[in-house]
Image: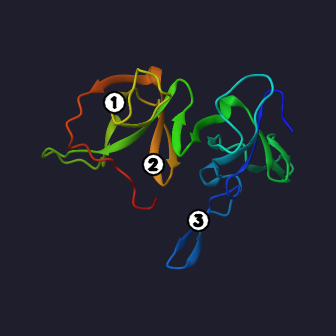
């Protein structure tokens, strides 16, 4: 079964990532279905669209918009599936709802975007509560354009970044048009990953 314009996907594991194992005990982090931070973004492609060619293939892993698998309450208090829901473990996903895709074990960003790891801020004798360098990071995934390269240190414009957790690492999705500067890599830059991840 194929859709004319949408991908057909299923959750990689389950719809929500709201539990964590700690010393063999499962801890529930959130009980609200509406909080987007705990909705799974990991999907597996079941079928590709008929209307256009794509290098994304059935079986590929995707990072998708949180509203694909999300549930919500309507104005009457009834719990509903998102408009992407088709049937059990089957959802529609537009090309504009895909952020990363994995092929042959490697992640690729969608055209026009890159993913940047924040870096630890060097204190340089200044007193500051900031842990990471603002608006600066190391490129981890790209769209294979020549504008930004993997492991390059870049700066980006304010409010252009959006936070994701990819393979247990916190990364920012940044549009390529928001990359404002390329820094020389000094070699002492350290990626910043929160311990709770």
Residue 28, compared with residue 17, is above or below; it is below
Q: Secondary structure at mark 2?
A: strand
**Residue extending farthest bottom:** 24
Pointer 2 or 3: first along the chain: 3
Colour pattern of the rendering:
rainbow
Q: Which residue is mark 3?
A: 29
In the image, taking residue 196 as reference, residue 50 lies left or right, namely right
**Residue extending farthest left:** 125
User: Can you tell which of label 3 and label 1 is closer to the viewer?
Assistant: 1
Q: In which quadrant is the N terminus drawn?
A: top right
User: Can you tell which of label 2 and label 3 is closer to the viewer?
Assistant: 2
Alpha-carbon span between mark 3 and mark 1: 33 Å
Q: Residues within 10 Å of mark 2 (few under 14, many from 20)?
A: some
Q: Which residue is mark 1?
A: 154
Who is closer to the viewer here, 38 or 105? 105
How far across and down, in percent of the image, does residue 38 sit? 62, 55
In the image, taking residue 97 as reference, residue 116 lies left or right, namely left
Residue shown at the point (30%, 25%) measured from the top left: 182
Who is closer to the viewer here, 103 or 187? 103
Tell me if label 3 and label 1 are in contact, CB under 8 Å.
no
Q: Which residue is mark 2?
A: 170
In the image, taking residue 127 as reference, residue 191 lies left or right, namely right
Residue 32, compared with residue 49, is above or below; it is below
**Residue extending farthest front:** 104
How far across and down, in percent of the image, does residue 60 sit? 65, 43
Pointer 3 or 1: first along the chain: 3
Who is closer to the viewer here, 71 or 24? 24
How far across and down, in percent of the image, does residue 23 sit? 49, 79
Alpha-carbon span between mark 2 and mark 3: 18 Å
How far across and down, in percent of the image, does residue 70 sit? 72, 49
Residue 14, compared with residue 76, is above or below; it is below
Alpha-carbon span between mark 1 and mark 2: 16 Å
């Amino acid at each position: 079964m194929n859709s004319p314009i949408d991908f057909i996907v299923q959750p990689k594991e389950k719809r929500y990532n709201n539990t964590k194992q700690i010393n063999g005990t499962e801890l529930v982090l959130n009980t609200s279905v509406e909080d987007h931070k705990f909705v799974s973004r990991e999907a597996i492609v079941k079928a590709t669209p008929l209307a256009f060619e794509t290098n994304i293939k059935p079986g590929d892993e995707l990072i998708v918009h949180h509203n694909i698998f999300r549930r919500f309450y309507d104005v009457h208090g009834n719990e509903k599936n998102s408009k992407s829901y088709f049937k059990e473990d089957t959802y529609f996903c537009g090309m504009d709802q895909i952020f990363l895709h994995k092929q042959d074990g490697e992640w690729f960003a969608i055209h026009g975007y890159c993913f940047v790891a924040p870096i630890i801020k060097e204190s340089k004798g200044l007193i500051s509560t900031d842990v990471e360098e603002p608006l600066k990071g190391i490129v981890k995934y790209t769209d294979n354009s020549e504008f930004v390269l993997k492991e390059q240190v870049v700066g980006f414009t304010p409010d252009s970044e959006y936070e994701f957790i990819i393979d247990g690492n916190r990364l920012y999705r940044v549009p390529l048009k928001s990359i404002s500067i390329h820094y020389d890599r000094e070699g002492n830059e350290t990626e910043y990953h929160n311990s709770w991840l």
